[in-house]
Image: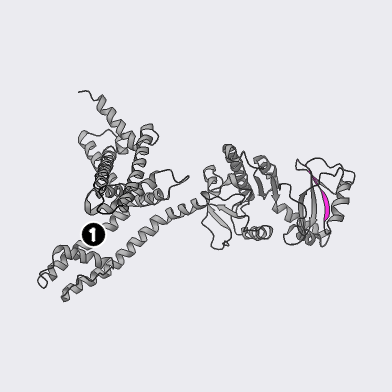
Amino acid sequence: MSRGPFRAAQKFVRDAFHAPKTRVYSVVQGLIWALIGFSILWIVVDALLPSDHGFRPVLQVVDSIILVIFGAEWILRVGSYRPPSTQVFRLPPLSRLRVIGWSRVRFALRPMQLIDLAAVLAVFPGLRGLRALRLLRLLRTAPAFRYANPFTALISAAESNGLLFTFAFSVLGVETILGGITLWLVEGPANPDLNIGDGLWWALVTITTVGYGDISPATGLGRVVGGFLMVGGMFTLAFFAGIIGQSLVTALLKIREEQFRMSEYANHIVVCGWDATTHLLLDAIRIELDLDETRVVLFDTHDRPANLPPDFLWVQGDPTKQSELDKVRMTAASAVIVTGERTARPQESDAKTILTVFTIRSYLDHHADAVKHRREQLYIVAEILDRENVDHARTAGANEVVETRRLGSSMLAHATRFHGAADVMSKVLLAGAHNIYIGRLPENVDIYHDVLRNIGPNNPGVLCMGLRLADGEDLINPPKKTPVPAGASLIYLAESPVLPAPRDT
C-alpha cells in the first residue's frame, strides 16, 4: 500500500489543527467557533426549560453529539501534534516513537488542553456543569482582542513556568500522600471507620489551611502529624504564592498595557522619555493644559515611576521601535514631545531623540490609511542638547526643535550684559504669567500695520510681536508696511490666548 495518501491525510489533519496560516485551519476553527456558540445557546435553552419538558431528551441527545465532536476534535488535535525536535533530527524509529509519544502527552497536559478535555468530560451526567468551559475556548481563540489576548498571555506565563508549577504540585502531592497515609496508619486502630481516602482528604484540607473539620485526629500522635502538616502547609502556600507572583505579574502588566492601546483615547499628547528632570516638564504641562480634557501619556522603557502623579498615564515600551508605537495609539495622538536624556552624553541623547522622531514618522507612513483622515499632521516637538543636531532632528521629521541647553546658556550670557533680561525672558517663557502665543489672523488684513491697528486696540493687554509665515519662518517686529501673506499667523504676548490657534477650526 502506498504511503502517499496516508501522509497526505496526516498533513491535512496537522494543518487543520496546527497551521494557522492555512485555509483548512481557518475553516476548521470557524466551524469550531460556530459549534461552541451553538452549544452555549443550547445550554441556555436547556437551563430555561422545565425538567419535565418533552423537548429535554432531544436537547440531551444533541448535547451528547456535540460533546462527541469536541472529543474527536481534541483527540485529533493531540494526536496530530508533531514535536519540533522531529523536524530537526533524524531519529531511529523507536526513538522517534518515544519522542513523539512523550511530546504528545506533555502537549495534552498543557493548561488549555486540560480545559478543553474537562469540557469534553461533561458527557458524564455528574459533570454536566463543565459544559460552560466551552465558552472559555471561544474567548481564547476568537479574534475578540485586536492586539493581544489576555487569556493567551496568562496561559503563556503559566506554560513558561511549567517546571516551577510541576515542582510545586509535586511537593503538594507528596505532602498529601505522606500525611494521609500516616494518619490512616496512626488513627486506624482508634477509628475503624477511617479509610485511606479519608486520610488523603484530611491531609489536603489541612495543608491548604481550609480546615472543614469533618475529619480530625483523635490520638496524640495523630495531632502531631496534623501539626507538621499545618506548618508544612504554610510553607507550601508561600511557595505557590511566590511562583504565581513571579510568573503571572509580567503577564498582568502586559494586559494592563493593552488597556490604553484598546481604548478610544484620541487627541492625546505623548511624551517619549523619562529622567529625573521630567517632572519639570510635567509641571509646565499641567499649567498649560486641562488634563481632564487632554490626556498626557508618558512612554518609556522603564516601569512606572513611583513619583509620577496619577493624572498622567504611563505606558511601558520602546519609542524607537515601530512595533511598540501601537501601545500609545500614535495614529490618534495630537502631538508628541521627545525629551532628551540628560544622564547620557549629549550626542548619545540626541541620537536617541532623532531615532525616535524618525521612527514615529516612519510608523505614520506605514499606517497611511489610519492617518489619511486626520485634520492635520501629527506635531512633533523634539528636545536637542547639542546644536549640531538641530538640522538632523528637523530632517528626521520634527516640526519644532527646542535647544534647551543653548537657550539656557544664551540667557545666562545675556544677563551679564543686560541685567534683568533673563528674568524678563523667564516670565515670558514660563507658563502661568505673560506668554508667547500664536493665533490665527482675521482675513481682512493686508499689511502688518492693519494687524497693529485692529488686534492691539481691540484686545487690551496684547502685545503684537510679529508674524509666523505658513512655511514656518518667523518675522519678529517687521516693518508696518510688511505684507501679510495667506496662511500667516500672529505672534503676540499676552496673559492668556485671545486668538484661536492656527490648528483650531
Q: Count of labels shown?
A: 1
Q: Nearer the viewer, residue 72 or 305?
A: 72
Residue drawn at x 36%, y 42% as measured from the top left:
33
Q: Is residue 494 visible?
A: yes
Q: Is residue 459 left or right of residue 268?
A: right
Residue drawn at x 29%, y 58% as measured from the top left:
168
Q: Which image quadrant: the N terminus?
A: top left
Helix, strand or loop at mark 1: helix
Q: Measured from the top left, where is residue 389 in percent x and y?
A: 68, 44
Q: Measured from the top left, where is residue 338 in percent x and y?
A: 63, 49
Query: Given the current orientation, which residue lies at the most extreme top position?
Result: 2
Q: Is residue 240 left or right of residue 288?
A: left
Q: Can you say whether 137 is above or below 248 in the image?
A: above
Q: Is residue 477 left or right of residue 392?
A: right
Is 470 colored magenta in this rendering? yes
Stretch in magenta:
461-474
Q: Measured from the top left, where is residue 352 in percent x and y?
A: 60, 46
Query: Given the current orientation, which residue lies at the most extreme bottom position?
Result: 220
Residue kind at label 1, given as amino acid type: Gly
Q: Measured from the top left, where is residue 252 in percent x and y?
A: 43, 55
Q: Nearer the viewer, residue 316 or 409?
A: 316
Residue drawn at x 38%, y 44% as measured from the top left:
141
Q: Residues within 10 Å of mark 1 (few under 14, many from 20)?
A: some
Location of residue 412 by image quarter: bottom right
Residue at label 1?
Answer: 173
Q: Is residue 88 visible?
A: no
Location of residue 14 by image quarter: top left
Residue drawn at x 28%, y 29% as measured from the top left:
9
Colour mode? one colour
Q: Is residue 502 left or right of residue 248?
A: right
Is 244 colored magenta in this rendering? no
